[in-house]
Image (tube, helix red, strand yellow):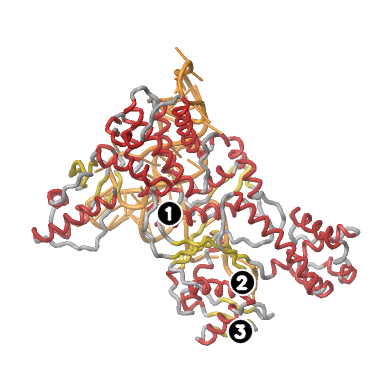
RNA sequence: GCGCCUGUAGCUCAGGGGAUAGAGUGCUGGCCUCCGAAGCCAGAUGUCACAGGUUCAAAUCCUGUCAGGCGCGCCA
């Protein structure tokens, strides 16, 4: 509906330019908005106020010209001038009825558009290190990324969803070490366990699996560990020395077996958890594969050739400060190891080379310092950094009652996403995560989520859906007639305030979807659905649907079927189920 | 110290140049012989952190101050 009004205004402005010889710029976008107040009609535009100065007219005078030159439309009842120069559009009854018919015809396609036709977008999200189960903080990025991907798809973009697996680097060594040490405990006498290794119980579980499979095959290396290692002061150094020793004494092959087993198990767990939340990926992209294919080395030599690298203190630095970064960054450490940043450059270049028009990353807010350097690298490689769009998700801070829950992956002291879903349910978790703007800090109170689980906003919306299903069941049970074609002919019988309000809310849905996708703000869908559900519940309590008068009844049924469809479609974008019974 | 995010009702948050600033929750009081009461209806609540500025118009944009979160490694 909004695009229709925009076109009418465009045509009017065109007409005015030709006949009135008024001059004003044509590049000012025409904004048409839903009004907040019913007295202001259905839609309004402030265009006259924006153009008045250029045209040398008072806003209200220009508004009058615009209104006088509007082409007639069967969808518009009238256009008024109000306040300082707003043009208010009152839609015809016919316009609202047409929307109900549209929804019936389009079904689960209602709300889709071709705004992004032909545009390929990669959305990368979650991408946590496979060193432990997902925790509640990760859940937010997961729910948000999935919803953004769904939104874009709904608007016609060709979307691919990707999880970047950081399966290389020191963290993976610490993981292997942690598992091995727990494994030793199963083989023989207790063994010290470094504070900085991964403490979680899942490490013991993986170790137990290894022991079951391989018995004590990996235990001999224990006796070759230097005794003094347990007394080292620097705990980070201790880890590195331990890792070196384990690799040496265990041998590369056995070491890889342990590491692989640990990573596979953890990734399997992550994947399962995400799938149970209805979150899926087209690709799981391995960081290691970037090294194996030589892409990391390629990137480094490309940067080298263009003079973007230099040696200092034994390390290789990238001149990111040339591209707005506050300092240069290391890509190869003095020990010859490539940094995480090095593989990240290769990864992003690879994304670009796969031909996406747009590359979206959903990152935790703690990574914001990375944005500049990644864009710097892309620019240095001759790519357009603006194709990369980074969406930051602020932290979810967990509370139990009023006390903050401290979380650390290494200490194993954290609440997992699985715990959360078990407590509040997957639908509630997904909905809760996206009911806030992503750049808003999220206070997640577990006690509250638990104690109020039945008051959770998602149930309110799902309940509206289930109620409609229930009414339709009753319709069948009572063998009452409902002919969709005839129902759509009789929509003018719907004159109750609730009915009129709902008929004004339903056509907003495609507009909300469009706006939410463009601004990457799925919370707009959540708020819209709550509004719609509120209107339905009010309607339900004030009117009977299953009445004797056939025509009237059918019109009402047609309306609530349309509501049900929009609720379904909206919840689907958020990844929340729409149960027929609760 | 520098950078990013945030400050709106008791609490959790929408609104992010436009008309009288809104929801949920909580509180008080009503509504089931009636299609599902996980619902509905009614009632009270604001220094939009503070101070300047920009303009026809500022909760919204700019500057500064205060407060909170996060980041600023040859970690990932």
Residue identifier under label 1:
A154
Which quadrant of the figure has residue A194?
bottom right
Q: First in sequence, mark 1 or 2: give its number.
A: 1
Q: Height in image: A550 above or below A357?
A: above
Image: A136 above or below A544:
below
On the image, the x and y values in percent for residue A545 come to: 39, 27
Q: Chain of mark 2?
A: A
Q: Chain of mark 3?
A: A
Identify the subunit bearing mark 1: A
To which residue does mark 2 refer?
A: A340
Which residue corresponds to the image point at 59% horizontal and 55% vertical from the top-left?
A138
Report the disc number at residue A312: 3
Respond whether the residues carrying marks 3 and 1 are from the same subunit: yes
Residue A399, above or below A195: above
Is B5 or A512 nearer to us in this picture? A512
Percent position of residue A451, x then y: 60, 35
Marks 2 and 3, the one that precedes in the sequence:
3
Q: Nearer the viewer, mark 1 or mark 2?
A: 1
Residue A96 lies in quadrant? top left
Between A24 and A473, the one lying in front of the other is A473
Q: Left or right of A202: which side holds A102?
A: left
- Judged from the image, the secondary structure of the residue bearing numbered disc 1 is helix
- Residue nearest the viewer, comparing A411 with A281: A281
Q: CA distance from mark 1 to mark 2?
A: 34 Å
Q: Secondary structure at mark 3?
A: strand
The residue drawn where x is 67% and y is 70% is A168
Tell us which disc is closer to us: 3 or 1. 1
């Amino acid at each position: 509906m909004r695009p229709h009004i925009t076109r009418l205004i465009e045509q009017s402005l065109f007409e005015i330019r030709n006949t009135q010889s008024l001059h004003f710029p044509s590049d000012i976008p025409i904004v048409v908005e839903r009004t907040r107040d019913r007295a202001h009609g259905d839609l309004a535009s402030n265009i006259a106020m924006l153009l008045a100065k250029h045209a040398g007219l008072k806003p209200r005078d220009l508004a009058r010209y615009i209104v006088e030159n509007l082409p007639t439309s069967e969808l518009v009842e009238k256009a008024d001038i109000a306040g300082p120069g707003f043009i208010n559009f009152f839609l015809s009854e016919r316009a609202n009825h047409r929307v109900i018919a549209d929804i019936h015809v389009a079904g689960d396609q209602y709300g889709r558009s071709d705004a992004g036709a032909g545009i390929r977008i990669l959305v990368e999200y979650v991408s946590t290190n496979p060193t432990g189960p997902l925790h509640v903080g990760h859940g937010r990025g997961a729910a948000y990324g999935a919803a953004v991907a769904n939104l874009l798809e709904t608007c016609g973009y060709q979307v691919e969803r990707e999880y970047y697996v950081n399966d290389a680097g020191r963290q993976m060594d610490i993981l292997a070490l942690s598992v091995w040490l727990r494994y030793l405990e199963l083989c023989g006498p207790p063994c010290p366990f470094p504070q900085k290794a991964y403490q979680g119980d899942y490490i013991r579980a993986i170790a137990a699996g290894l022991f079951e499979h391989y018995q004590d095959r990996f235990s001999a290396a224990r006796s070759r560990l230097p005794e003094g290692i347990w007394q080292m002061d620097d705990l980070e150094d201790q880890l590195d020395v331990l890792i070196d020793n384990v690799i040496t004494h265990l041998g590369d092959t056995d070491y890889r077996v342990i590491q692989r087993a640990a990573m596979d198990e953890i990734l399997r767990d992550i994947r399962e958890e995400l799938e149970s939340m209805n979150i899926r990926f087209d690709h799981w992209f391995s960081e290691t594969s970037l090294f194996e294919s030589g892409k990391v080395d390629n990137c480094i030599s490309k940067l080298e050739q263009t003079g973007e690298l230099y040696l200092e203190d034994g390390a290789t630095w990238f001149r990111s400060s040339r591209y707005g970064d506050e300092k240069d960054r290391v890509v190869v450490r003095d020990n010859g190891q490539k940094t995480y940043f090095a593989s990240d450059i290769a990864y992003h270049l690879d994304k670009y080379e796969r031909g996406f028009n747009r590359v979206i990353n959903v990152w935790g807010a703690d990574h914001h310092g990375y944005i500049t350097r990644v864009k710097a690298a892309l620019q240095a490689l001759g790519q357009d950094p603006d194709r990369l769009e980074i969406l930051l998700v602020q932290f979810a801070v967990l509370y139990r009652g009023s006390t903050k829950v401290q979380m650390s992956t290494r200490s194993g002291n954290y609440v997992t996403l699985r715990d959360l879903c078990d407590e509040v349910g997957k639908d509630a978790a997904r909905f809760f995560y996206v009911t806030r703007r992503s750049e808003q800090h999220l206070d997640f109170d577990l006690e509250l989520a638990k104690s109020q689980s039945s008051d959770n906003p998602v149930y309110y919306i799902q309940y509206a859906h289930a109620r409609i299903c229930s009414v339709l069941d009753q319709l069948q049970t009572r063998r009452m007639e409902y002919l969709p074609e005839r129902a759509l002919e009789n929509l003018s019988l719907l004159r109750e305030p609730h009915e009129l309000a709902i008929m004004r809310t339903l056509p907003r849905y495609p507009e909300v979807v469009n706006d939410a996708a463009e601004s990457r703000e799925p919370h707009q869908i959540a708020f819209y659905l709550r509004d719609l559900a509120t209107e339905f519940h009010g309607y339900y309590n004030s009117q009977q649907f299953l009445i004797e008068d056939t025509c009237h009844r059918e019109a009402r049924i047609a309306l609530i079927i349309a509501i049900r469809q929009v609720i379904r479609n909206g919840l689907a974008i958020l990844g929340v189920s729409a149960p027929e019974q609760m």
